[in-house]
Image (tube, rainbow, N blue to C red):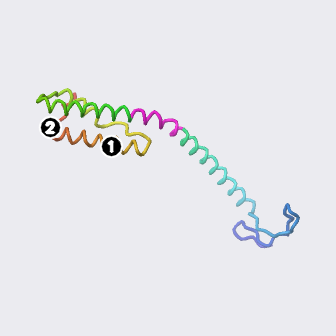
Amino acid sequence: MRELGGVQAGGPLRRARGGAARAGFSLGGTAASAAAGLLAGEAVAGIGLGLLAAQESAEAPARDAAARARAEGLLEELTGLQRDLLRGRRDPGRLERLAALEAGEEGADPALREAVRAIALRARLELARRGWEAPPTR
């Protein structure tokens, strides 16, 4: 038999489980152990990715709950801002609260994420309309 790069061609006929004889290729010793090492590495990587996906899916409800709370807070402050406008009042504290909620969790659910982004955009627009500048940090 002739070996080419760890692959042996023209090996002896082997009996398959069904009883029919067939020929096949086999990997040489070093190539076989390298292939087995690669497969083991892929299995470990697959397990790692699986654990990461499981952890991420476990975090998804918490992320969605935080995003909902943020969206509700933004909507509450935007509604208050609208009421203040209709009453002819201005509440600087409301702008601070709105600005604080502007950035944060958007959620894991794509539909929720889109809704939260739209609400946050509205908050940014309202802050820009009122010339809001964040107080300097110390």
Tell me residue 55's x, y (percent).
53, 38
Separation of marks 1 and 2 at Cα, in angstroms = 20 Å
Give the residue pinned by disc 1: 117
Number of residues whose C-alpha sits closer than 10 Å to that of mark 2, classed few (under 14), some (14–19) or many (20 or more): few
Q: Which residue occupies 87% across, 65% down?
A: 15
Query: Does the stretch in magenta take in 46?
Result: no
Q: Quadrant of the C terminus?
A: top left
The part of the image, by quadrant, that contains residue 136 is: top left
Give me the disc on residue 56: none
- Label located before the other in sequence (1 or 2): 1
Q: Amino acid at mark 2?
A: Arg
Tell me residue 48's x, y (percent).
58, 43
Query: Does the stretch in magenta take in 57?
Result: yes
Instruction: Work out whether 44 lies above or below 64.
Output: below
Tell me residue 110's x, y (percent).
42, 45
Instruction: Work out whether 28 lies above or below 71.
Output: below
